C-alpha cells in the first residue's frame, strides 16, 4: 500500500533541530528526513510489535548520542520530542555537517562545490 500525496504529513522537525527520543535516553540532531518510512523491512520487523511505529509518518535520520556512544539513528516522528536543553552534541559528524548557532540548534555548513 503506497501513501497518496495528500496523506503525507509535513515534518514536525527540521534539519539542524535537536531532538530527543520519547522512550529511550538519547538525543540527536536531524540531518535528513524521509516523508514516510524508507528503510528496510528487516529493520522494521526487528522492532517489537507493540513498539512498531506506523510507516505513514515522517522518519528522521539523526546524528545521535547517549551517555555511552555516538551513532546514527532512524526514528519515527511519533517517538521524538524537541530537546530544549541547549546542550551541544558531541557526535563527531555534527561538526562536519553543521555549525552550532549558539541557541541550541544547528545550521548546515556551506558546501564548497567546484
Image (tube, grey):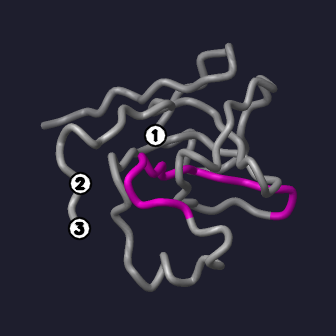
SS label for mark 2: loop
Whether tag 3 and tag 2 are in contact, CB under 8 A, the answer is yes
Most foreground residue, 26 or 94: 26
84 lies left or right of 78: right
The answer to whether residue 24 is magenta is: no
Distance from the alpha carbon under mark 3 to that under mark 2: 7 Å
Q: Which residue is mark 1?
A: 97
Structural crowding at the residue carrying mark 3, measured as other residues with C-alpha within 10 Å and reported as few (<14), some (14–19) or many (≥20): few
Which residue is drawn at the image coordinates 81% and 26% (left, top)?
85
Q: Quadrant of the C terminus?
A: top left
Q: Which residue is mark 2?
A: 3
Identify the image quadrant of residue 8: top left
Residue 41 appears at what percent x and percent y? 39, 81
User: Of callouts 3 and 1, which one flags the residue occurring earlier in the amino acid sequence?
Assistant: 3
Residue 99 appears at what percent x and percent y? 53, 26
Residue 14 appears at what percent x and percent y? 46, 30
Q: Which residue is mark 3?
A: 1
Amino acid at each position: 500500500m503506497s501513501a497518496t500525496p495528500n496523506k503525507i504529513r509535513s515534518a514536525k522537525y527540521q534539519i539542524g533541530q535537536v531532538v530527543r527520543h520519547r522512550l529511550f535516553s538519547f538525543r540527536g540532531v536531524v540531518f535528513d528526513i524521509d516523508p514516510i518510512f524508507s528503510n528496510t523491512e528487516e529493520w522494521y520487523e526487528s522492532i517489537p510489535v507493540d513498539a512498531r511505529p506506523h510507516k505513514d509518518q515522517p522518519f528522521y535520520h539523526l546524528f545521535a548520542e547517549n551517555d555511552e556512544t555516538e551513532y546514527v539513528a532512524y526514528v519515527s516522528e511519533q517517538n521524538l520530542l524537541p530537546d530544549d536543553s541547549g546542550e551541544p552534541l558531541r557526535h563527531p559528524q555534527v561538526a562536519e555537517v553543521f555549525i552550532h548557532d549558539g541557541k541550541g540548534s544547528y545550521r548546515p555548513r556551506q558546501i564548497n562545490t567546484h
